[in-house]
Amino acid sequence: MDDMYEDMADKGRKGDTYVGHLTGGEMVVPVAVLDAEDGFLRKAINGAMKDMEVNPDQFTVGHEDNSVNPETGQIEFGLGSWIKRKVFRQKVKGPSAAERKAVAEAKARIEKQQKELDARKVTLDQQKQAAFRARRGRGGSYSLLSSQDTLGG
């Protein structure tokens, strides 16, 4: 029977080299999609699986941790009813510590950028007011724009 599966695997298209047991509704995500955006999706999926105490390597095709169907000798990817019950019983968790840290860091970066923009706006307003006073003192005309007019605000 192994020869039959090897023959099937050899006939894979578009780089496919494995034959496995899958369940309807399972999603197989191409490596290119998993690794796009610095592996954002792969990291998110791995994190979600680890939160459910599931080994993500078991669900990575070709990994030594793949489960093998004892009747066919082929890899399989089902969670099994024990983990399904566990997953559905879990309460909805809030963000993980790593996610909370990432959000806090992003928020701090945004606040820092906002302070820098506010400081540049004050400096720009001061420069415009000084130019306006200087021009006015020489008897010329000058149109004063606010920093919002020039910064798109």
Image (spheres, rainbow, N blue to C red):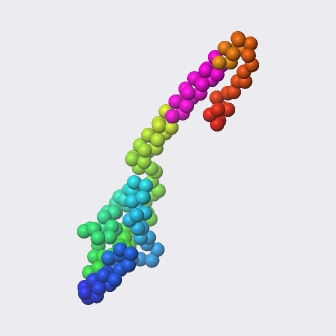
Tell whether 129 sits left or right of 39: right
* Residue under the image location 35 percent in, 74 percent down: 15
Quadrant occupied by the N terminus: bottom left
Residue 28 sits in quarter: bottom left
Closer-to-camera residue (48/137): 137
Residue 73 sits in quarter: bottom left
* Residue under the image location 71 percent in, 11 percent down: 138
* Residue under the image location 41 percent in, 77 percent down: 23
* Residue under the image location 47 percent in, 37 percent down: 109
How far across and how far down the image is residue 56, in percent? 33, 63
Closer-to-camera residue (103/147): 147
How far across and how far down the image is residue 111, in percent? 51, 34
Reply above or below: 125 against 92. Answer: above
Tell whether 10 sits left or right of 103: left
Quadrant occupied by the C terminus: top right
How far across and how far down the image is residue 62, in percent? 29, 70
Closer-to-camera residue (8/151): 151
Reply above or below: 9 against 141. Answer: below
Reply above or below: 4 against 51. Answer: below
How far across and how far down the image is residue 108, in percent? 47, 36
> Magenta region: which residues?
113-130
Is residue 127 shown in magenta? yes
